Image (cartoon, helix red, strand yellow):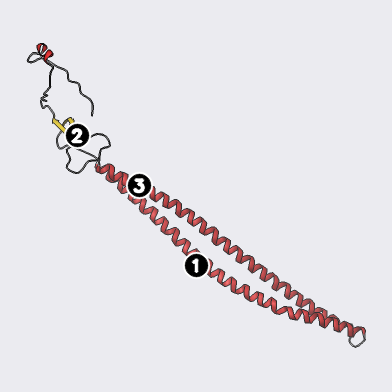
Amino acid sequence: GNDFSKMTIEILRQQRDLILEKIKQVDSRLTQKKQWLSERLRMNDHQTDEARIGLKSLEPAVVQAKDMIERYRELEREGFVSHTVVSEKLSDFTTLQSRVLTATQQVQQLERQNVELRVESADFEQQANSDKLSFQMELEKTNQAIELAKFQSNSLVTAGVGGRVVVSSVRLGQYVNRGDSLFMVAPEGAKISVRLNVPAEATARLEVGQHVKLRYAAF
């Protein structure tokens, strides 16, 4: 009866507390992940900007090196410089091109990392929100179950004495207030008196002490 209902409510409340703790953990993990990703993105953006600036600064040197090679080749054709000098300038230009390639690859790598971090952030947030929604739906069901258990616990009606219900003052589904009279109970062994209206034409067939059968509609 009431003890079972109280135990059910207590179990449901513990389950609700567990769900609330899970929701809190999801929020905490999401906050921590956002902070971590935000810091990573900030650092990565800074490194990307520096890498782009470094790559941009090499562009004038590349143009200048190309012009320099053309001039030295012209001087070589005119006999003013040796082929060794031109080869050295070409070697310097190759080294510069290697630096440009490395800087370009670094920028591309950092840009890919930026994209990957943002995708990771979006995926994690989507999964966290999905988990949170699932827990919230479970919480709503648990709260409804608690309310139902409370209602069932409070709706249990018991009589102060043992006996038999002889009169019902309520019908199924009816709302009642505290203190309303719901049933009339006849104690065990009590004699029940019934007052009946009998048609005049039936009085001739009635005698004192005669056994009768009473039928009445169920309540």
Place of residue 85 in the rendered image (x, y in percent of width and height, measured from the top left) = 85, 84
Q: Quadrant of residue 118?
A: bottom right
Q: Which residue is mark 1?
A: 35
Q: Is residue 215 visible?
A: yes
Which-is-in-front pick, marks 1 and 2?
A: 2
Q: Earlier in the sequence, mark 3 or mark 2?
A: 3
* Distance of label 3 from label 2 (alpha carbons): 30 Å
The answer to which of 200 and 90 lies nearer the viewer is 200
Dot 1 falls on a residue whose secondary structure is: helix
Q: Are marks 1 and 2 in contact (CB under 8 Å)?
A: no
Dot 3 falls on a residue whose secondary structure is: helix
Q: Is residue 218 placed above or below 98 in the rendered structure?
A: above
* Distance of label 3 from label 1 (alpha carbons): 36 Å
Q: Which residue is mark 2?
A: 169
Question: Residue drawn 20% across and 23% down?
Answer: 216
Mark number, residue 125: none
Q: Is residue 88 visible?
A: no
The amino acid pointed to by label 3 is: Gln
Crowd tier of the residue under label 1, counting other residues whose Cα lies within 10 Å: few below 14, some 14–19, many 20 or above: few
Q: Residue reaching furthest bottom? A: 80
Place of residue 53 in the rendered image (x, y in percent of width and height, measured from the top left) = 66, 77
Question: Residue drawn 41% across and 49% down?
Answer: 138
Place of residue 136 in the rendered image (x, y in percent of width and height, measured from the top left) = 42, 52
* Distance of label 1 from label 2 (alpha carbons): 65 Å
Mark number, residue 144: 3
Crowd tier of the residue under label 2, counting other residues whose Cα lies within 10 Å: few below 14, some 14–19, many 20 or above: few
Q: Is residue 163 placed above or below 151 in the rendered structure?
A: above
Q: Earlier in the sequence, mark 1 or mark 2?
A: 1
The answer to which of 116 and 203 lies nearer the viewer is 203
